[in-house]
C-alpha cells in the first residue's frame, strides 16, 4: 500500500486524507500508526495532521534510500493508549506471586 496512491470512498487520498485514518467521525482512531513515504513536504504534512489529531511521536524517525529517493517512517500513538498499557502492566505485576528478593 502506498501512502498517497490509495483511493478512499471515491476520493483520491492526499497527505491530509490518510487511508489509515478513520473513515467516519464516529469510528475509533487506531492507537498506533506507522506513517511511511517519500521524504517530502506531503509526508511532513501527514505527520503534522496526525499531531493535530491528538497523536504524539513514538520513537525516532527512520530513513532509508531505495535507490532513487529517501523513504521515511515515523510511528505515532494516542496518549491514552500508553496510559492503558501502563495500567495493564501495573495490574499484571500486582497479580504476580513472587516471594523472592531482588529483581527478577
Image (cartoon, helix red, strand yellow):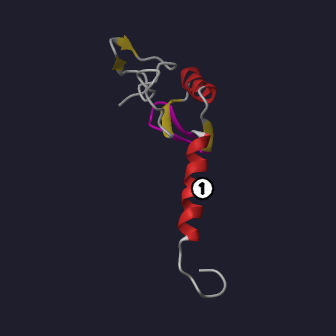
Q: Nearer the viewer, residue 53 or 67?
A: 53
Is residue 18 positioned above or below 89 on the image? Answer: above
Q: Nearer the viewer, residue 39 or 51?
A: 51
Is residue 104 positioned above or below 53 on the image? Answer: below
- Label 1 environment density (alpha carbons within 10 Å; few <14, some 14–19, many ≥20): few
Q: Residue at x 63, y 37 (%)?
A: 56
| Quadrant occupied by the N terminus | top left
Q: Position of residue 85 (x, y in %)?
A: 55, 53
Kindly state the secondary structure of the residue where label 1 is placed.
helix
Q: Is residue 73 magenta?
A: yes
Q: Residue at x 47, y 36 (%)?
A: 30
Residue 63, located in which quarter of the rendered image? top right
Task: Name the main secondary structure of what is drawn in magenta.
Answer: strand
The residue where tag 1 is placed is 86
Q: Is residue 69 left or right of residue 23?
A: right
Q: Position of residue 93 (x, y in %)?
A: 57, 69
Q: Position of residue 24 (x, y in %)?
A: 42, 21
Residue 79, located in which quarter of the rendered image? top right
| Quadrant occupied by the C terminus | bottom right
Residue 54, located in which quarter of the rendered image? top right
Residues shaded magenta: 59-77
Q: Nearer the viewer, residue 76 or 78?
A: 78
Q: Is residue 24 magenta?
A: no
Q: Is residue 8 left or right of residue 44?
A: left
Residue located farthest toward the bottom when viewing the structure as drawn: 100
Q: Position of residue 31 (x, y in %)?
A: 50, 40
Amino acid at each position: 500500500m502506498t501512502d498517497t496512491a490509495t483511493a478512499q470512498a471515491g476520493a483520491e487520498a492526499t497527505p491530509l486524507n490518510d487511508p489509515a485514518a478513520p473513515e467516519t467521525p464516529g469510528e475509533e482512531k487506531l492507537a498506533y500508526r506507522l506513517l511511511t513515504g517519500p521524504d517530502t513536504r506531503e509526508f511532513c504534512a501527514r505527520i503534522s495532521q496526525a499531531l493535530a489529531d491528538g497523536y504524539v511521536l513514538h520513537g525516532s524517525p527512520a530513513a532509508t534510500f531505495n535507490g532513487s529517493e529517501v523513504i521515511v517512517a515515523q510511528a505515532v500513538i494516542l496518549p491514552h493508549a500508553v496510559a492503558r498499557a501502563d495500567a495493564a502492566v501495573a495490574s499484571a505485576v500486582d497479580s504476580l506471586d513472587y516471594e523472592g528478593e531482588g529483581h527478577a
